[in-house]
């Protein structure tokens, strides 16, 4: 659903009419979902399933932080982890990657190495280092055949460089593998059901996937409630607008390169971005907000 083209109350109304939700592939829904203390059991289960750390140990000892709550501008928010979990001496970050672009991959890698540096700085002894783990839920990834893959450092010929780095592990969850899966719930593992609930937008399918599991039923109810929350929908609408503006700007900038006559080129670039946003039925007030142009300038264009 193109949430950037209509008002918040209309979005909520349309979702209700279509029997749909804003799914947990959206960063903000994903993070809000798993910072709810009632989701502690499912979050423990996911981390345990992927890392093989004891589920009960995770449940009893984990501390979950939502890094968005401590930052106040868009650039800062773009540089935060989706979700950070501390379990004893282990630091685990969970990332929802709806877009598998170069910027996202670079940012996730930077987050991972930043976590390693901070963990080493905090460790009092070698035994206290624990593990730094990154779990990435990747929507658009085609080169991994397994649902869960662990990534180690390799050289260009794909030889493992240093097995002593086993304390620093990346896991990738290939969500694209589930797009063709049979929705026969009786044949699905609980882990697969959770992932499909995160991906699904249709309420009827969500209820089918959660049926008979109280924790999963709560998960579905939480997603449904967030899709009715004006603040959540407004946030997602604005995020979509920023994404559109960013992608258009990058596309036009790449075309222009380092041409001479930069000022005129920049102006022409703005006109193209505005035209494409208008073609997508983005409201003029929203275009003004995210381009810095006045409504009068936009109308002239």
Image: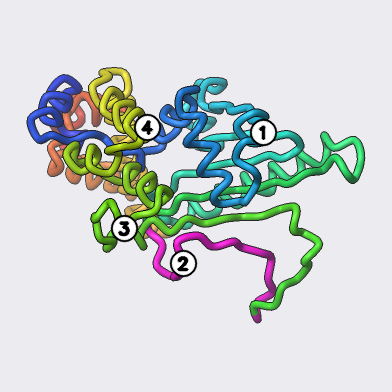
Mark positioned earlier in the residue sequence (1 or 3): 1
Residue 3 lies left or right of residue 248; in this view the side is left
Quarter of the image with the C terminus in it: top left
Q: Nearer the viewer, mark 3 or mark 2?
A: 3
Task: Locate the N terminus by quadrant.
Answer: top left
Q: Is residue 87 magenta?
A: no
- The answer to the question of whether label 1 and label 3 lie on touching residues, with beta carbons closer than 8 A, is no
How far is disc 3 from disc 2 in space, using C-alphas?
18 Å
First in sequence: mark 2 vs mark 4: 4
Asked whether residue 162 is in view, the answer is yes
Q: Which residue is mark 1?
A: 86
Marker disc for residue 187: 3
Q: Position of residue 237 (x, y in %)?
A: 27, 30
Which comes before the other along the chain, label 3 or label 2?
2
> Dot 2 corresponds to which residue?
146
Above or below, comparing residue 256 to residue 66 in the picture: below
Q: Residue at x 51, y 29 (%)?
A: 40
Residue bounds of the magenta highlight: 140-157
Secondary structure, mark 1, is strand
């Amino acid at each position: 659903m193109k949430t950037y083209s209509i008002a918040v109350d209309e979005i909520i109304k349309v979702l209700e009419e279509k029997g749909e939700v804003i799914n947990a592939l959206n960063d903000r829904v994903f993070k809000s979902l798993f910072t709810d203390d009632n989701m502690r059991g499912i979050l423990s289960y996911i981390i345990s399933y992927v890392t093989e750390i004891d589920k009960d140990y995770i449940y009893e000892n984990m501390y979950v932080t939502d890094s968005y709550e401590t930052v106040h501008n868009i650039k800062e928010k773009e540089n935060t982890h989706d979700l950070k979990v501390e379990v004893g001496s282990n630091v685990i970050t969970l990332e929802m990657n709806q877009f598998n672009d170069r910027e996202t991959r670079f940012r996730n890698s930077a987050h991972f190495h930043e976590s390693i540096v901070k963990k080493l700085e905090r460790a009092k002894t070698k035994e206290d280092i624990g593990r730094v783990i990154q779990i990435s839920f990747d929507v658009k990834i085609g080169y991994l055949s397994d649902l869960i893959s662990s990534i180690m450092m390799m050289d260009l010929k794909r030889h493992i460089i240093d097995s002593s780095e086993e304390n620093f592990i990346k896991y990738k969850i290939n969500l694209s593998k589930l797009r063709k899966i049979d929705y026969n719930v009786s044949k699905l593992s609980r882990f697969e059901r959770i992932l499909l609930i995160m991906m699904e937008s249709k309420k009827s399918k969500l209820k089918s996937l959660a049926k008979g599991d109280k924790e999963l039923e709560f998960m579905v109810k939480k997603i449904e409630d967030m899709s009715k929350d004006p603040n959540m929908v407004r946030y997602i609408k604005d995020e979509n607008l920023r994404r559109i503006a960013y992608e258009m700007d990058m596309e036009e900038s790449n075309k222009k390169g380092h041409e001479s006559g930069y000022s005129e080129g920049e102006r022409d670039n703005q006109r193209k971005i505005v035209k494409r946003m208008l073609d997508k039925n983005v409201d003029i007030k929203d275009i003004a907000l995210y381009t810095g142009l006045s409504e009068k300038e936009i109308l002239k264009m």
